[in-house]
Image (cartoon, rainbow, N blue to C red):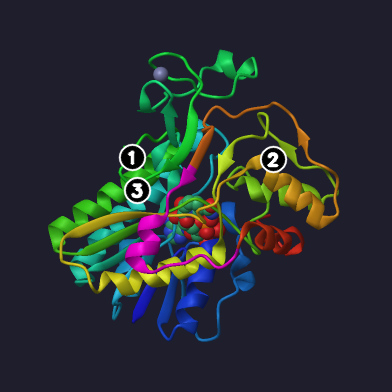
Amino acid sequence: MRVLVTGGAGFIGSYIVRALASGGHEPVVLDALLPSAHGPAGAASAVDLPPGVRLTVADVRDRDAVARALSGIDAVCHQAAMVGLGKDFADAPEYVGCNDLGTAVLLGEMAAAGVRALVLAGSMVVYGEGRYDCPAHGPVRPGPRAVADLEAGRFEPLCPVCGAELVPGLVTEEAAGDPRNVYAATKLAQEHLASAWARATGGRALSLRYHNVYGPGMPRDTPYAGVASFFRSALARGEAPRVFEDGCQRRDFVHVRDVASANAAALSDLEERGPGTFDAYNTGSGTPHTIGEMARALSAAHGGPEPVVTGEYRLGDVRHVTADSRRLREELGWKPETDFAAGMREFATAPLRSAR
Ligand SMILES: NC(=O)c1ccc[n+]([C@@H]2O[C@H](COP(=O)([O-])OP(=O)(O)OC[C@H]3O[C@@H](n4cnc5c(N)ncnc54)[C@H](O)[C@@H]3O)[C@@H](O)[C@H]2O)c1
Ligand SMILES: [Zn+2]
Protein backbone atom coordinates (compact mmCIF):
# COMPACT_ATOMS: atom_id res chain seq x y z
CA MET A 1 0.00 0.00 0.00
CA ARG A 2 1.29 3.48 -0.82
CA VAL A 3 0.54 5.68 2.19
CA LEU A 4 0.85 9.45 2.50
CA VAL A 5 1.96 10.23 6.06
CA THR A 6 1.30 13.91 6.82
CA GLY A 7 3.50 15.13 9.66
CA GLY A 8 5.73 12.16 8.83
CA ALA A 9 8.85 14.09 9.84
CA GLY A 10 7.49 14.55 13.37
CA PHE A 11 7.94 12.46 16.49
CA ILE A 12 5.12 9.95 15.99
CA GLY A 13 4.96 10.28 12.19
CA SER A 14 8.59 9.24 11.73
CA TYR A 15 7.97 6.02 13.71
CA ILE A 16 4.89 5.33 11.57
CA VAL A 17 6.97 5.83 8.41
CA ARG A 18 9.55 3.32 9.68
CA ALA A 19 6.87 0.82 10.73
CA LEU A 20 5.16 1.03 7.34
CA ALA A 21 8.43 0.74 5.41
CA SER A 22 9.50 -2.30 7.39
CA GLY A 23 6.01 -3.81 6.90
CA GLY A 24 6.43 -3.77 3.13
CA HIS A 25 4.38 -0.63 2.46
CA GLU A 26 5.52 2.47 0.62
CA PRO A 27 5.24 5.56 2.85
CA VAL A 28 5.63 9.06 1.41
CA VAL A 29 5.82 12.12 3.64
CA LEU A 30 4.34 15.59 3.53
CA ASP A 31 5.49 17.85 6.35
CA ALA A 32 5.83 21.63 6.72
CA LEU A 33 8.74 21.19 9.20
CA LEU A 34 7.12 23.69 11.55
CA PRO A 35 9.67 25.70 13.56
CA SER A 36 7.69 24.89 16.76
CA ALA A 37 8.48 21.20 16.14
CA HIS A 38 11.76 21.30 14.21
CA GLY A 39 13.50 24.55 15.11
CA PRO A 40 14.37 27.41 12.77
CA ALA A 41 14.27 27.02 8.99
CA GLY A 42 16.85 24.69 7.50
CA ALA A 43 16.04 21.76 9.76
CA ALA A 44 15.20 19.57 6.74
CA SER A 45 18.69 18.09 6.85
CA ALA A 46 18.01 16.83 10.38
CA VAL A 47 14.91 14.86 9.35
CA ASP A 48 15.55 11.17 9.79
CA LEU A 49 13.59 9.14 7.23
CA PRO A 50 14.42 5.66 5.93
CA PRO A 51 16.32 5.65 2.64
CA GLY A 52 14.16 6.15 -0.43
CA VAL A 53 11.21 7.76 1.41
CA ARG A 54 10.10 10.86 -0.48
CA LEU A 55 9.65 14.03 1.62
CA THR A 56 7.55 16.94 0.33
CA VAL A 57 8.17 20.01 2.46
CA ALA A 58 4.76 21.68 2.32
CA ASP A 59 1.86 22.73 4.47
CA VAL A 60 -1.32 20.64 4.49
CA ARG A 61 -3.17 23.89 3.81
CA ASP A 62 -1.41 24.16 0.43
CA ARG A 63 -3.99 22.65 -1.93
CA ASP A 64 -1.69 22.27 -4.90
CA ALA A 65 1.08 20.61 -2.93
CA VAL A 66 -1.40 18.25 -1.28
CA ALA A 67 -2.99 17.38 -4.63
CA ARG A 68 0.46 16.52 -6.05
CA ALA A 69 1.41 14.49 -2.99
CA LEU A 70 -1.82 12.46 -3.27
CA SER A 71 -1.06 11.20 -6.74
CA GLY A 72 -0.91 7.37 -6.70
CA ILE A 73 -1.75 7.20 -2.97
CA ASP A 74 -3.95 4.40 -1.55
CA ALA A 75 -4.42 5.74 2.00
CA VAL A 76 -3.56 8.75 4.16
CA CYS A 77 -2.24 8.64 7.69
CA HIS A 78 -2.84 12.20 8.95
CA GLN A 79 -0.43 13.11 11.75
CA ALA A 80 0.32 16.74 10.87
CA ALA A 81 -0.87 19.05 13.62
CA MET A 82 0.27 21.71 16.02
CA VAL A 83 0.43 19.97 19.39
CA GLY A 84 0.52 20.93 23.08
CA LEU A 85 -1.12 23.76 24.99
CA GLY A 86 0.76 26.56 23.22
CA LYS A 87 1.95 29.81 24.78
CA ASP A 88 -1.41 31.50 25.32
CA PHE A 89 -4.80 32.00 23.70
CA ALA A 90 -3.25 34.17 20.99
CA ASP A 91 -2.00 30.90 19.43
CA ALA A 92 -5.61 29.89 18.68
CA PRO A 93 -5.71 30.95 15.00
CA GLU A 94 -2.49 29.05 14.29
CA TYR A 95 -3.84 25.86 15.95
CA VAL A 96 -7.15 26.09 14.12
CA GLY A 97 -5.36 26.86 10.85
CA CYS A 98 -2.92 23.95 10.96
CA ASN A 99 -5.23 21.40 12.49
CA ASP A 100 -8.71 22.14 11.16
CA LEU A 101 -8.28 24.15 7.98
CA GLY A 102 -5.36 21.82 7.24
CA THR A 103 -7.55 18.75 7.70
CA ALA A 104 -10.33 20.26 5.57
CA VAL A 105 -7.91 21.01 2.72
CA LEU A 106 -6.45 17.50 2.92
CA LEU A 107 -9.91 15.87 2.93
CA GLY A 108 -11.07 18.10 0.09
CA GLU A 109 -8.12 17.04 -2.04
CA MET A 110 -8.62 13.38 -1.07
CA ALA A 111 -12.23 13.68 -2.22
CA ALA A 112 -11.10 15.12 -5.52
CA ALA A 113 -8.34 12.55 -6.01
CA GLY A 114 -10.55 9.57 -5.11
CA VAL A 115 -8.46 8.56 -2.07
CA ARG A 116 -10.96 6.92 0.28
CA ALA A 117 -8.94 5.63 3.26
CA LEU A 118 -7.91 7.78 6.24
CA VAL A 119 -6.28 7.09 9.58
CA LEU A 120 -6.35 10.18 11.79
CA ALA A 121 -4.10 10.96 14.73
CA GLY A 122 -6.83 11.54 17.29
CA SER A 123 -6.25 12.38 20.93
CA MET A 124 -7.59 11.62 24.38
CA VAL A 125 -7.86 15.40 24.84
CA VAL A 126 -11.26 15.20 23.11
CA TYR A 127 -12.70 13.76 26.36
CA GLY A 128 -11.62 16.53 28.70
CA GLU A 129 -11.73 14.88 32.09
CA GLY A 130 -11.68 11.08 32.07
CA ARG A 131 -14.27 8.77 33.57
CA TYR A 132 -15.39 9.26 37.17
CA ASP A 133 -17.85 7.39 39.34
CA CYS A 134 -19.62 8.84 42.36
CA PRO A 135 -20.36 6.25 45.06
CA ALA A 136 -23.97 7.55 45.15
CA HIS A 137 -24.58 8.78 41.59
CA GLY A 138 -22.62 6.39 39.40
CA PRO A 139 -20.81 7.78 36.35
CA VAL A 140 -20.71 11.60 36.43
CA ARG A 141 -18.95 14.26 34.38
CA PRO A 142 -17.32 16.91 36.54
CA GLY A 143 -16.98 20.34 34.91
CA PRO A 144 -13.74 22.31 34.62
CA ARG A 145 -11.99 22.83 37.95
CA ALA A 146 -12.40 26.23 39.65
CA VAL A 147 -9.35 28.51 40.01
CA ALA A 148 -10.13 28.94 43.71
CA ASP A 149 -9.97 25.17 44.25
CA LEU A 150 -6.71 24.81 42.35
CA GLU A 151 -5.20 27.77 44.24
CA ALA A 152 -6.15 26.09 47.51
CA GLY A 153 -4.55 22.81 46.43
CA ARG A 154 -7.92 21.08 45.97
CA PHE A 155 -7.08 19.24 42.78
CA GLU A 156 -9.61 16.39 42.73
CA PRO A 157 -12.84 17.17 40.87
CA LEU A 158 -15.92 16.44 42.99
CA CYS A 159 -19.33 15.01 42.13
CA PRO A 160 -21.35 17.78 40.42
CA VAL A 161 -24.51 16.50 42.16
CA CYS A 162 -23.46 15.85 45.76
CA GLY A 163 -19.88 17.10 46.06
CA ALA A 164 -18.53 13.68 47.08
CA GLU A 165 -15.04 12.46 46.19
CA LEU A 166 -15.02 10.57 42.89
CA VAL A 167 -13.32 7.35 41.84
CA PRO A 168 -11.42 7.76 38.54
CA GLY A 169 -11.91 5.01 35.95
CA LEU A 170 -11.03 4.19 32.34
CA VAL A 171 -12.62 6.30 29.64
CA THR A 172 -14.31 4.46 26.76
CA GLU A 173 -14.89 5.71 23.24
CA GLU A 174 -18.60 6.31 23.98
CA ALA A 175 -17.78 9.16 26.40
CA ALA A 176 -19.05 12.51 25.13
CA GLY A 177 -16.56 14.98 23.67
CA ASP A 178 -15.66 17.78 26.09
CA PRO A 179 -12.55 19.59 24.82
CA ARG A 180 -11.07 21.92 27.43
CA ASN A 181 -8.58 24.00 25.42
CA VAL A 182 -7.98 25.21 21.87
CA TYR A 183 -5.79 22.25 20.89
CA ALA A 184 -8.41 19.81 22.21
CA ALA A 185 -11.16 21.65 20.31
CA THR A 186 -9.15 21.34 17.09
CA LYS A 187 -8.58 17.60 17.63
CA LEU A 188 -12.32 17.00 18.11
CA ALA A 189 -13.12 19.11 15.04
CA GLN A 190 -10.67 16.97 13.01
CA GLU A 191 -12.75 13.91 13.90
CA HIS A 192 -16.00 15.63 12.94
CA LEU A 193 -14.48 16.65 9.60
CA ALA A 194 -13.21 13.11 8.98
CA SER A 195 -16.64 11.70 9.77
CA ALA A 196 -18.36 14.20 7.45
CA TRP A 197 -15.83 13.40 4.71
CA ALA A 198 -16.46 9.66 5.06
CA ARG A 199 -20.23 10.11 4.76
CA ALA A 200 -20.00 12.50 1.84
CA THR A 201 -17.46 10.53 -0.21
CA GLY A 202 -18.08 6.92 0.82
CA GLY A 203 -14.66 6.98 2.43
CA ARG A 204 -13.46 4.92 5.40
CA ALA A 205 -11.94 6.78 8.33
CA LEU A 206 -10.60 5.72 11.67
CA SER A 207 -9.29 7.95 14.46
CA LEU A 208 -6.76 6.60 16.92
CA ARG A 209 -7.16 8.60 20.11
CA TYR A 210 -3.59 8.48 21.39
CA HIS A 211 -3.08 8.92 25.10
CA ASN A 212 0.30 10.23 26.36
CA VAL A 213 2.82 9.13 23.76
CA TYR A 214 6.49 9.00 24.77
CA GLY A 215 9.76 7.53 23.55
CA PRO A 216 13.14 8.32 22.01
CA GLY A 217 13.13 11.30 19.65
CA MET A 218 10.38 13.11 21.52
CA PRO A 219 10.74 16.88 21.00
CA ARG A 220 12.57 18.80 23.70
CA ASP A 221 10.48 20.96 26.04
CA THR A 222 8.70 23.82 24.32
CA PRO A 223 5.23 25.26 25.03
CA TYR A 224 4.09 22.66 22.50
CA ALA A 225 5.54 19.55 24.16
CA GLY A 226 4.10 16.96 26.53
CA VAL A 227 4.90 16.30 30.18
CA ALA A 228 7.28 13.37 29.62
CA SER A 229 9.40 15.69 27.50
CA PHE A 230 9.44 18.41 30.20
CA PHE A 231 10.74 15.94 32.78
CA ARG A 232 13.24 14.34 30.45
CA SER A 233 14.58 17.75 29.37
CA ALA A 234 14.97 18.87 33.00
CA LEU A 235 17.02 15.75 33.75
CA ALA A 236 19.17 16.41 30.67
CA ARG A 237 19.98 19.84 32.18
CA GLY A 238 20.85 18.20 35.51
CA GLU A 239 17.70 19.61 37.13
CA ALA A 240 14.91 17.88 39.08
CA PRO A 241 11.64 17.29 37.21
CA ARG A 242 9.03 19.77 38.48
CA VAL A 243 5.74 17.95 39.05
CA PHE A 244 2.59 20.10 39.00
CA GLU A 245 -0.40 19.76 41.37
CA ASP A 246 0.32 16.93 43.83
CA GLY A 247 1.69 14.48 41.26
CA CYS A 248 -1.30 12.14 41.57
CA GLN A 249 -2.78 12.99 38.15
CA ARG A 250 -3.41 9.72 36.31
CA ARG A 251 -2.47 9.23 32.67
CA ASP A 252 -1.84 6.36 30.27
CA PHE A 253 1.70 6.51 28.88
CA VAL A 254 1.92 4.63 25.61
CA HIS A 255 5.18 3.99 23.79
CA VAL A 256 5.63 5.60 20.39
CA ARG A 257 6.53 2.25 18.78
CA ASP A 258 3.19 0.86 19.95
CA VAL A 259 1.39 3.89 18.53
CA ALA A 260 3.14 3.28 15.20
CA SER A 261 2.04 -0.36 15.16
CA ALA A 262 -1.53 0.75 15.96
CA ASN A 263 -1.43 2.94 12.85
CA ALA A 264 -0.22 0.04 10.73
CA ALA A 265 -3.02 -2.16 12.13
CA ALA A 266 -5.59 0.58 11.48
CA LEU A 267 -4.48 1.03 7.87
CA SER A 268 -4.91 -2.65 7.09
CA ASP A 269 -8.22 -2.80 8.98
CA LEU A 270 -9.65 0.05 6.87
CA GLU A 271 -9.70 -2.27 3.89
CA GLU A 272 -12.24 -4.46 5.70
CA ARG A 273 -14.62 -1.61 6.54
CA GLY A 274 -17.73 -0.52 4.72
CA PRO A 275 -17.89 2.77 2.78
CA GLY A 276 -19.01 5.93 4.59
CA THR A 277 -17.79 4.83 8.01
CA PHE A 278 -15.92 6.63 10.77
CA ASP A 279 -14.84 5.07 14.04
CA ALA A 280 -12.60 6.11 16.93
CA TYR A 281 -10.36 3.94 19.12
CA ASN A 282 -8.55 4.71 22.33
CA THR A 283 -4.86 4.03 21.92
CA GLY A 284 -3.25 3.54 25.31
CA SER A 285 -1.14 0.98 27.12
CA GLY A 286 -4.04 -0.05 29.36
CA THR A 287 -2.09 0.52 32.59
CA PRO A 288 -2.59 3.94 34.21
CA HIS A 289 0.26 5.62 36.07
CA THR A 290 0.50 8.92 37.88
CA ILE A 291 2.57 11.85 36.68
CA GLY A 292 4.55 11.56 39.92
CA GLU A 293 5.34 7.89 39.23
CA MET A 294 6.54 8.79 35.76
CA ALA A 295 8.81 11.54 37.09
CA ARG A 296 10.29 9.18 39.71
CA ALA A 297 10.84 6.39 37.16
CA LEU A 298 12.67 8.78 34.83
CA SER A 299 14.80 10.34 37.58
CA ALA A 300 15.83 6.94 38.92
CA ALA A 301 16.72 5.53 35.51
CA HIS A 302 18.57 8.70 34.51
CA GLY A 303 20.44 8.82 37.81
CA GLY A 304 19.20 12.38 38.29
CA PRO A 305 17.75 14.40 41.17
CA GLU A 306 14.45 13.34 42.77
CA PRO A 307 11.37 15.09 41.33
CA VAL A 308 9.99 18.17 43.14
CA VAL A 309 6.21 18.38 43.60
CA THR A 310 5.42 22.09 43.21
CA GLY A 311 1.63 22.45 43.58
CA GLU A 312 1.58 24.66 40.47
CA TYR A 313 -1.20 24.08 37.95
CA ARG A 314 -2.19 24.90 34.38
CA LEU A 315 -5.84 25.85 33.88
CA GLY A 316 -6.32 23.77 30.71
CA ASP A 317 -5.08 20.55 32.35
CA VAL A 318 -7.47 17.80 33.31
CA ARG A 319 -6.99 15.83 36.52
CA HIS A 320 -7.23 12.22 35.38
CA VAL A 321 -7.70 10.69 31.96
CA THR A 322 -6.83 7.07 31.28
CA ALA A 323 -7.84 4.83 28.43
CA ASP A 324 -9.89 1.74 28.08
CA SER A 325 -8.16 0.43 24.92
CA ARG A 326 -9.99 -2.89 24.82
CA ARG A 327 -11.71 -2.19 21.49
CA LEU A 328 -8.42 -1.54 19.74
CA ARG A 329 -7.01 -4.79 21.11
CA GLU A 330 -10.10 -6.87 20.36
CA GLU A 331 -11.24 -5.44 17.02
CA LEU A 332 -7.87 -4.66 15.44
CA GLY A 333 -5.79 -7.34 17.13
CA TRP A 334 -3.31 -4.72 18.37
CA LYS A 335 -1.12 -5.34 21.40
CA PRO A 336 1.28 -2.86 23.04
CA GLU A 337 4.75 -4.40 23.39
CA THR A 338 6.62 -1.91 25.61
CA ASP A 339 5.62 -1.76 29.27
CA PHE A 340 5.96 1.30 31.48
CA ALA A 341 9.12 0.27 33.37
CA ALA A 342 11.10 -0.79 30.29
CA GLY A 343 9.85 2.14 28.22
CA MET A 344 10.75 4.73 30.85
CA ARG A 345 14.19 3.15 31.39
CA GLU A 346 14.89 3.50 27.67
CA PHE A 347 13.41 7.02 27.46
CA ALA A 348 15.41 8.24 30.48
CA THR A 349 18.67 8.16 28.54
CA ALA A 350 17.55 8.18 24.88
CA PRO A 351 18.13 11.38 22.90
CA LEU A 352 15.41 14.01 22.48
CA ARG A 353 14.86 15.95 19.30
CA SER A 354 15.94 19.56 19.39
CA ALA A 355 13.23 22.06 18.45
CA ARG A 356 15.51 25.07 18.70
N1 LIG B 1 2.57 13.26 21.34
C1 LIG B 1 1.44 12.91 21.92
O1 LIG B 1 1.43 12.52 23.10
C2 LIG B 1 0.14 12.95 21.17
C3 LIG B 1 -1.04 12.59 21.86
C4 LIG B 1 -2.25 12.61 21.18
C5 LIG B 1 -2.29 12.97 19.85
N2 LIG B 1 -1.15 13.33 19.19
C6 LIG B 1 -1.26 13.69 17.78
O2 LIG B 1 -0.27 12.98 17.05
C7 LIG B 1 0.11 13.74 15.90
C8 LIG B 1 1.64 13.81 15.83
O3 LIG B 1 2.12 14.48 16.99
P1 LIG B 1 3.65 14.47 17.44
O4 LIG B 1 3.68 14.30 18.90
O5 LIG B 1 4.42 13.54 16.59
O6 LIG B 1 4.05 15.99 17.13
P2 LIG B 1 5.26 16.59 16.24
O7 LIG B 1 5.17 18.07 16.41
O8 LIG B 1 6.54 15.90 16.54
O9 LIG B 1 4.82 16.19 14.77
C9 LIG B 1 3.86 16.90 14.02
C10 LIG B 1 4.43 17.11 12.65
O10 LIG B 1 3.42 17.75 11.84
C11 LIG B 1 4.03 18.78 11.10
N3 LIG B 1 2.98 19.79 10.83
C12 LIG B 1 2.28 20.50 11.74
N4 LIG B 1 1.39 21.31 11.12
C13 LIG B 1 1.54 21.09 9.80
C14 LIG B 1 0.92 21.61 8.65
N5 LIG B 1 -0.04 22.56 8.74
N6 LIG B 1 1.30 21.15 7.43
C15 LIG B 1 2.26 20.18 7.33
N7 LIG B 1 2.91 19.67 8.39
C16 LIG B 1 2.55 20.12 9.62
C17 LIG B 1 5.15 19.31 11.98
O11 LIG B 1 6.15 19.95 11.22
C18 LIG B 1 5.66 18.03 12.64
O12 LIG B 1 6.69 17.43 11.90
C19 LIG B 1 -0.58 15.07 16.01
O13 LIG B 1 -1.73 15.05 15.19
C20 LIG B 1 -0.99 15.14 17.47
O14 LIG B 1 -2.16 15.93 17.65
C21 LIG B 1 0.06 13.33 19.83
ZN1 LIG C 1 -22.58 12.24 43.80
Decide: few, some or many residues near mark 3? Use Cα within 10 Å; few <14, some 14-19, many ≥20.
Answer: many
Residue 105 picture location, percent across and down: 29, 57
Q: Nearer the viewer, residue 276 or 290?
A: 290
Q: Which mark is residue 175?
A: 1
Q: Secondary structure at mark 3?
A: helix
**Of the image marks 3 and 2, the number of the one nearer the N terminus:** 3
The image quadrant of residue 11 is bottom right
Residue shown at 65% from the left, 29% from the top: 245
Is 238 included in the stretch rendered in magenta? no
Type of residue at label 2?
Gly
The image quadrant of residue 151 is top right
Type of residue at label 1?
Ala
Q: Nearer the viewer, mark 3 or mark 2?
A: 2
Q: Which residue is mark 2?
A: 292
Q: Nearer the viewer, residue 289 or 195?
A: 289
Q: Which residue is mark 3?
A: 100
Q: Is residue 73 left or right of residue 46?
A: left
The residues colored magenta run 322-338
Q: Secondary structure at mark 1?
A: loop
Q: Nearer the viewer, residue 29 or 11?
A: 11
**Of the image marks 2 and 1, the number of the one nearer the N terminus:** 1
On the rendered image, what quadrant is the C terminus found in? Answer: bottom right
Kindly tell me whether mark 1's CB lies below 8 Å from ligand 1.
no
On the rendered image, what quadrant is the N terminus found in? Answer: bottom left
Q: Secondary structure at mark 2?
A: helix
Type of residue at label 3?
Asp
